[in-house]
Each structure stands twice: as C-alpha cells, then as structure tokens.
Image (tube, rainbow, N blue to C red):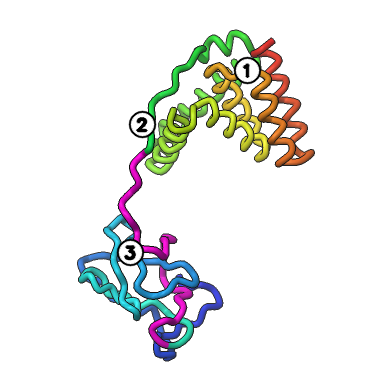
Amino acid sequence: MQAAGVPRVAADGGEVAGCDRRIRNGCSRCWRVTRGALPKNSWRSRHGETNRLLSSYGEDTSGGLTFWPHFAGEGARATLTGFCYHLLMTTMVTTAERPATSERKEPTYLFTEKYVADKSEIARRFIETRARLNGNVDKSNNFLVKRFYNIDHNTYLEGVLPAKTKELMGLVASACLRCDDCIYYHAIQAYRLGVTRVEQEESLNVALVVGGSIVIPHLRRAYELLEEIYG
C-alpha cells in the first residue's frame, strides 16, 4: 500500500502511475524502508530471504528482485518515503544474528502449581480457569498463536537475567497495563521461584509510580492474592 499522503514520484522527479516493482524468481512479496533512509541500505523480504543491497535508485543489484521505490526529492540521495511494503527493516546493513550471551534454560521451581492452588482459593480459580481456556485455544491449532506462546515461554527462561527478575518485571508491566489475570500469573510464578512477599510488594510500588492511581484497584486484588499465598 502506498503511504497516505506520499506522492508517487521517481528519483528524477517524474510521476509514477502505479507501483513500479518488477518481480522475478517467483517472489510476490513487497519490501519496506524506514522514512529518512538513504540509498544503498539493507533490505529483507517478507518471507525471510537474505538481505540485499540496493543501488542508489532502489534497484536490487544482487540479481533477485528488481524494485523501484517511490522517492520524494531529486537525485540519488533523495529520501525514501513510501511504497508497497510489509515489514519495517533497519536502514543499516544487517550483521549476523548475535549469539546468546548465556544459555537459556527452564527455571527451577520451588513449588508446584498444585501447592499454590491448595494455599490460595484465588490462585486455584485462576490456575484452573487458565488451563481450561488454554485448552480451547490449543484445539484451534492456530500457528500464529502457538508461535506467540513459544516466544512468551522462552522470554521467561533463565538467562542473563534470572527468571525471578523476569517474573517481577512481568508483574510490574501487568499492573501498569491493568491486567488482573497477568498480575495473578506473574505473582504466582514469582512465588513458585522463591520470590519473597516484600520483593513482590516493592515491585508493585514501581508499577504504582509508573502507572498512577488507576493501578490501585488492581493493586488491591494483587495484595489479596499475596495475603493468601504468603499468609
């Protein structure tokens, strides 16, 4: 889609009647550039092809796609502003993926979910409801949802940051976003990892300062859960 309000003009200032990209090698994906990017930058296809280097007029010089973006301005250093695109990519040549600085691994829990459920009625209702509703999601076998769940799971693994720290970060973000289910989840996970009540309460202080007084109703419910699981 052409960006709203962006004129379709070629590098020499002439008008472009329509999207001027020419596709070879059976590729039907579009490309995208950030506003303000200069020529000879790195691009990547929507479906994960390797990066390609564009010439000063936006032509792919690596022999794959030949694609003319729509320029605003004149000459080879005109600023790229808008054209058919899907994914935002960096304006710098992409380097190899940075290796993980620490091996990720599953955290070691001190308590099971059943143990927490036996201690807290709030936790029991939440854990049972979450498992039941996740069962409905699993039945759909939705590829995108599964990918997102996988990212979520891997984010909270032990790494450079301890899993405890990540769960407290999740607790703060959840309180700021005013998601009670999310608050319950991260508070329970933090408890299972051995986080103390004082640590959870101090984390909620951060959420209150960042989120403001609208967080208070959720803070009350969080404290009710903490009262039940910590006693």
Image coordinates of residue 51 in percent, x first then y, are 30, 61
Q: Nearer the viewer, residue 149 or 209?
A: 209
Give the amino acid at mark 3: Arg
Please tell me the numbered disc located at residue 228.
Answer: none
Nearest to N terminus: mark 2 or mark 1: 2
* Circle 1 residues within 10 Å: few <14, some 14–19, many ≥20: few
Q: Which residue is under mark 2?
A: 103
Q: Quadrant of the C terminus?
A: top right
* Circle 2 residues within 10 Å: few <14, some 14–19, many ≥20: few
Give the amino acid at mark 2: Glu
Nearest to N terminus: mark 3 or mark 2: 3
Mark 2: secondary structure: loop
Question: Eyeballing the image, is 26 above or below 79?
Answer: above
Image coordinates of residue 66 in percent, x first then y, are 27, 75
State the extent of the magenta-drawn residues as a range.
Answer: 75-100
Question: Eyeballing the image, is 41 above or below 229?
Answer: below
* Circle 3 residues within 10 Å: few <14, some 14–19, many ≥20: few
From the viewer's perspective, tell me whether residue 215 is left or right of residue 43.
Answer: right
- CA gap, disc 3 to disc 1? 51 Å
In the rendered image, which quarter is residue 59 located in? bottom left
Q: Main secondary structure of the magenta part?
A: loop
Please tell me the numbered disc located at residue 29.
Answer: 3
Nearest to N terminus: mark 3 or mark 1: 3
Residue drawn where x is 57% and y is 26% of the image: 185
